[in-house]
Amino acid sequence: MPRLERTYKGAVRRHQLLLLGLTLLYWNLVIRFALFMRLLGARDDHMGDMLSKGMSFLVEEVVWSSVVISLFATLSWFTLNKLYPRLVRNFKMRKLAVGVVFLDILIFLIISILLGIVHYSVAQDLSFAESISHLPKFLFNSTILFFLIVLFVGGYVYQLINTLLQQVGYVPLGKIMMGYYQKPREEELIFMFLDLESSTAVAEKLGHEKYSYFIQDCFKCVSNSLLATRGRVYQFVGDEVVISWDAKREPSYKRAVDFFFLYEKALNKRRDYFEQEYGMMPVFTASLNVGKVMAAEVGEIKRELAFHGDVLNTAARIQKQCKRYSKKILVTNKFAVKLIKSTKEYKIEYVDLIKFFGKKRSIKIYEVHQA
């Protein structure tokens, strides 16, 4: 397990740095575009005054405003990805949305004032400290209001994009926006069905409200393992999650199995929390299958990307066999063959030949062990 963790140690951090970089780029583009549009709409005499100061004025304002924008972008990324999830996890705040709105307003106001100070200090050729002493002169002028409106609109679009990415995933969003899946498309994918063991008994013991928190806490541990192994959540169904990987990439077979053991390790790290909060430790079992499926957008009022094919049906049925054979992870013969070719870090053990109701052919199932 330590070797497995070392392999993926930097993957989550790289993903977070990528998101931070994209956030910085987004906000710099938004503010630059807004300033450009404001410049175009300025009076001729005002524009003449700005141009008369030469390139040094423009360069200085761009540099200092970039510092403030980068500070704001970093703060936005931190609050959205670190602060809010921590508040939810630690306090289970039911009215968190209200707190988020007020915090956003406070952040927007502070950054708007900072941008206004930068703009004023450069325009009046003053130091930053001198501009602060003149704050009452421009605190409620059009410049502060302009930046505040830009930040509000940009913040709304930023959170909208972030919500869309969380709903549909990072990979298919572009294809969905381009209408790629309006016509069914054939894809070759690996599917994992990850299910909570003895879920009915757990639900009866905890009660429906606490059980809901329990499932939330279980699936929060999925994220980092999923990012590390480049998987994609297809859907959450009660206490089960269905995950997919691109089968055309050979490393995906190893990554799919890696995900299960990484997730198991992530849960074990929070053992004390689960036992203290719920009086039990969650145990998950999984099945893996690979094959061709049809992917298409379905629904009119609420649309979602759906996959159709025997691959999913077989994987779902095999997952139910984990309890019968007391196994953690079961895979089909097709997946086992591909896994053996892609890595030597796992060994395969034959379990049984089973025939499911409604199917003509029997299916060999195998258990995966760490070598």
Image (cartoon, helix red, strand yellow):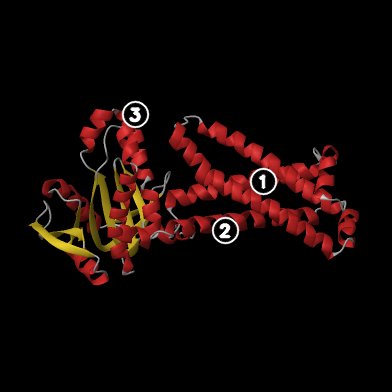
Q: Which quarter of the image is occupied by the C terminus?
A: bottom left
CB under 8 Å between discs 2 and 1: no
Residue at which label 1 appears: 151
| Residue 298 on image: x %, y % | 37, 51
Amino acid carrying mark 2 in the image: Gly
Task: Say above or below: 126 vs 246.
Answer: above
Residue pictured at 82% horizontal, 40% vertical: 135
Question: Which of these two is toward me, 95 or 174?
Answer: 95
Residue at which label 3 appears: 209
Q: Quadrant of residue 57?
A: bottom right
Tag 3 secondary structure: helix
Is residue 73 rendered to the left or right of residue 315? right
Residue pictured at 29% horizontal, 64% vertical: 254
Tag 1 secondary structure: helix
Q: CA distance from mark 1 to mark 3?
A: 38 Å
Tag 2 secondary structure: helix
Residue at which label 2 appears: 21
| Residue 68 on image: x %, y % | 70, 51
Residue pictured at 35% horizontal, 44% vertical: 219
CB under 8 Å between discs 1 and 3: no
Q: CA distance from mark 2 to mark 1?
A: 18 Å
**Does residue 43 appear in this view?**
no
